[in-house]
Image (cartoon, helix red, strand yellow):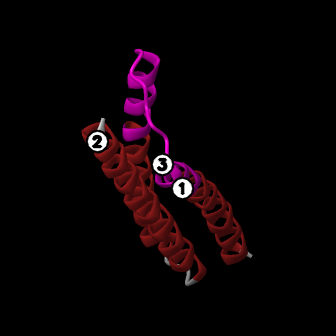
Amino acid sequence: MAEEVLDIEIIAMTLIGHAGETKSLAYQAMNAAKEGKFDEAEKFLKQSTEEMLKAHELQTDLIVREAGGEKMEVGLIMVHSQDHLMTAILFKELAKEFIEVYKRLEQK
């Protein structure tokens, strides 16, 4: 039981790390676009997506394990990691929208 809790906590902290990197890279993409550096923005956005996919893989693994009958002890750290991931995904989507706005402004 204690080993399972530790495993879940490690996964949660890893999720938080990937989510933080997702958001940070999306922010860098948005800033690059703001400066008119659209190729750089796209590179940051691609890296952001890669980090998000790493987080999704961990999340999917947990869902599959639980769906397979494994009981998960969900604590505050896991709840926080899920919240962190969802806000990072939302921020990334908003950053994509801002980048499009910056591109349109650049064209005018």
Which residue has dot 3 on it? 78
Question: Left of 26 or right of it: where is 10?
Answer: left
Label 1 or label 2, whichever lies nearer to me, is: 2
Which quadrant, please, contains the N terminus? Answer: top left
Q: Residue at x 49, y 41 (%)?
A: 74
Q: Which mark is residue 2?
A: 2
* Residue pictured at 41% horizontal, 64% vertical: 21
- First-in-chain label (1 vs 2): 2
Q: Amino acid at mark 1?
A: His
Secondary structure of the residue carrying numbered label 1: helix
**Position of residue 102 measured from the top left corner of the image (x, y, whole percent):** 66, 73
Magenta residues, start to end: 58-84
The secondary structure type at the circle numbered 3 is helix
Q: Position of residue 40 (x, y in %)?
A: 42, 71
Give the Cα distance between marks 1 and 3: 5 Å
Left or right relative to 18: residue 4: left
For the residue labelled by badge 2, is the local secondary structure a helix, a strand or a loop? helix
> Which residue is identified by label 1?
80
**Residue 53: image tag:** none
Residue at image coords 61%, 58% = 87
Residue 100 is inside the magenta segment: no
Q: Quadrant of residue 59?
A: top left
Mark 2 surroundings within 10 Å by alpha-carbon count, few (fewer than 14), some (14 through 19), many (20 or more):
few
Q: How far separated are the C-alphas under marks 2 and 3? A: 15 Å
Give yes or no for contact between labels 1 and 3 (Cβ–Cβ under 8 Å): yes
Q: Position of residue 73 (x, y in %)?
A: 45, 37
Viewer-proximal residue, 9 or 91?
A: 9
Seen from this angle, which residue lies furthest front? 1
